[in-house]
Amino acid sequence: MSVETDTPERARPEPIRAVPVRHPGRWVAVAVIGVLVAMFVHLLVTNKAFNWSFMVDEMFRPPIVEGVRGSIALLVTSMLIGVVLGVVLAVMRLSENPILRGVAWAYTWFFRAVPRLVLAILFGNLGILWARIEFGLPFDRQIGALFGVDDFEARLFGFSSVDILTGFVAGMLALGLSEAAYMAEIVRAGIQSVDEGQTEAAQALGMRRGQILRRIVLPQAMRVIVPPTGNETIAMLKDTSLVAFVPVSAELFFQLRAVGSRTFQVFPMLVAATIWYLLLTSVLLVGQYYLERHFAKGVGRGGRARTRLRAVTAESGGRIGKVDDA
């Protein structure tokens, strides 16, 4: 026997009347920024000090383009020295050998303390210390004097300091050695960000320390190393202008400043330098974006979801379906 009970129908709630929140401060900010942008555009268009026709005509001439190539070459070589030497110094800082740790610490202390402009000028004047740079047995003359042999020399080959320490080489060494001190700290932070359990597991598998660093630690540390390295690369591009004081003639800022001094149009050439550095930096920013995205695979929220989905798929024998890696 069943008993039927009447249940009253639930009344539908009235639709919610959503009232958007007003933000008058945003409109005020938009108005202020719009006025400032209009003033800036008016300045660019009406002020004759920019001399746009002269600037555009000069900033793409062959000497300026050659200066752009010189700046890029200086950037690449300096960063190559900085990255390679920085990795070596970072490994030395993390070594159990106190001598290696002390040497690496002293190097980073010195080159982080001295301004790059001072280093560039200092390296440009190293020819004052040595007329020739020679390779061979150290202290050969002193050793010969101990044994009563005058004018004893055990030197294999050498170069004149004027020939080898050109302005480009001096600027490259100054920037590269300075960058190595900063890269050492970046790489050291990246290595220390990797869980020590990774190293212990690799050691349990019988891997050598070099293999662990190359195959286990550094690939995972790249996610931490790449963003500040990209910033250092952009900073290095701007610091290449410092070698104009060495001087290095095959450099962008040197060539633009020379044109400004020769034509008495200094300000337009400074604006041209600003435009060139903006263009080159924009290219580096695009490259940094793709590098960061490559080494951040599987780390973000979407990457963690794909990793978990792959694990579930593997446990279920692949019945869930193919995981899209895009």
Image (tube, rainbow, N blue to C red):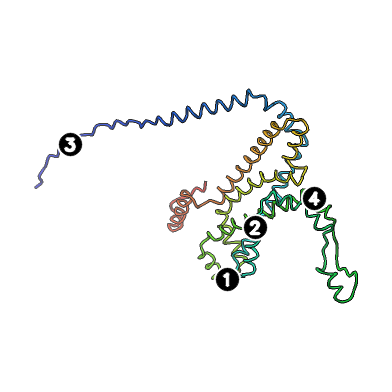
Q: Which residue is mark 2?
A: 86
Horizontal and vertical percent for residue 194? 53, 60
- Spatial separation of the CA atoms under disc 1 and disc 2: 27 Å
The one nearer the camera, 110 or 176, is 110
Residue 166 circle label: 4
Among the two numbered marks 4 and 1 on one chain, the one whose residue lies closer to the N terminus: 4
- Quadrant assignment, res 217: bottom right
- Spatial separation of the CA atoms under disc 1 and disc 3: 72 Å
Residue 251 to residue 56: above or below? below
Q: Which residue is mark 3?
A: 9
Horizontal and vertical percent for residue 261? 76, 34
Q: Residue at x 81, y 53 (%)?
A: 164
Point out the frontmost of discs 3 and 2. Answer: 2
Callout 2 secondary element: helix
Point out the frontmost of discs 4 and 1. Answer: 4
Point out the frontmost of discs 1 and 2. Answer: 2
Q: Residue at x 52, y 64 (%)?
A: 198
Mark 1 nearby-residue class (10 Å; few <14, some 14–19, many ≥20): few
Q: Which residue is mark 1?
A: 206
